[in-house]
Image (cartoon, helix red, strand yellow):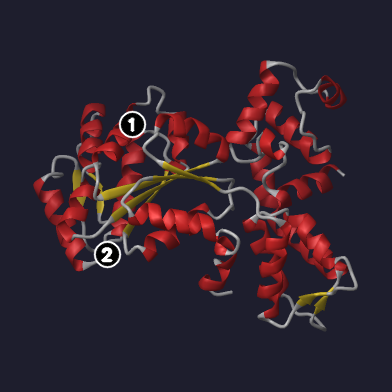
Amino acid sequence: MSPEKESVLELFGRQAQFQQITQTLANGRDLLIAGVPGSGRRTLVRRAARDVGAKVMEVDCIRATDGRRFVQLLCEGISQGVRSPEAIAFLQDWTAREGQAWFEFNATIPRKLSLQREPVLTAEQLWQAYQVLLQLPQQLAIAIERQVILIFQGFPHIRAWDRTAQWETGLQEAIARHTTANYVLIATLAESRTLYDEHRCLETICLTPLADDVVAAWAQLVLQQVGLSFDPRSPALETFLNAVQGHIGDASMLVGRLRQRRWDHGRLDDAAIAETLQDLLADLSNIFESLLVLLPASQLQLLESLALDPTDKPQSRDYIQKHHLSRGGSLQGAIAGLQHKGLIYGPDLGYRLALPLFALWIRQRLG
């Protein structure tokens, strides 16, 4: 499937949010976009940034383990976003003029800008490097007369090591100060509530699951492109919708797998959906296993309980006793932890598991 077709679902049913994101960026405003993993946050932002003609720089905050790594990732994002001869020339000149005490420039490699290797920067020098680096996108935007957008993926993850909020505050001040460079913070739904309180200058957009009729219309459209359709004489469409539950990423994976397989005829019945679904779950099992291994025991127990026995009241006495869950603060901590990881929704969506294929895999695993 081509990149254009792969991204169809992210806009299908999301036109209102896409228009809001595009207008926000076109008006030079900063943005907080929230949703669970696979909800289409990055695709919507990237397409909107492309439509407004901005230069995009992305920083994967999940990979940051300390301040030094965070600065390195910021250098990496800037390097990937600087491609035109004009922008490369600016970056080289900036490094020699303003960043020579902390940074190195090499035009022959993809990671053009990097922290100097020798001597290793002290903590104070690293903080100075960060403050100087935060000025670069604004300076670049002015120099090339083009909007620059920085996308921080999984931004709240820096709080795992930024205990005093020093680094977050530095970025917050840059967001408030800069007008030509704009910022997009990507977070989970639960994280967005805290971020909104602390970054009130950000326009906030939340992505919740799509309605079944929207997913059904999209799936039928994409399957028709390769001569496939759901057999109306079987519950094939219902099986498909029950499996993906309005989740963009999971629906895309399952439809992609259906398109790849060779079928004797164009009508997909319930058995065809079920068989393809099992093949997909088998291929995802290693990823799902690694997700479980990383969870604390209390979160793992709660996640498995919600997968096997969904409820909108996990704090109720009956549910706690039935599944032998910890009471009080431990349970509340597990709920909050799973929400912040984007693995379950909040009370507004009944504490549903946010990744439907993951939930199905857990049910079959515990079966």
Residue 358 position, x and y percent, is 71, 48
Q: Is 207 rendered above or below residue 16?
A: above
- Report the side of 308 relative to 5 (left or right): right
Inspect the image, locate mark 2, and give the three-letter code of the amino acid beneath it. Arg
Inspect the image, locate mark 1, and give the three-letter code of the amino acid beneath it. Trp
Few, some or many residues within 10 Å of mark 2 (<14, 14–19, 20+): few
Q: Is residue 40 visible?
A: yes
Q: Is 172 rendered above or below residue 133?
A: above
Quadrant where the C terminus lies? top right
Q: Which residue bears the numbered disc 1?
A: 167
Residue 224 position, x and y percent, is 70, 79
Q: Quadrant of residue 230?
A: bottom right
Q: Quadrant of residue 21?
A: bottom left
Q: At x 44% / y 62%, what residue is drawn?
A: 47
Q: Which residue bears the numbered disc 2?
A: 83
Q: Is residue 57 visible?
A: no
**In the foreground, 287 or 132:** 132
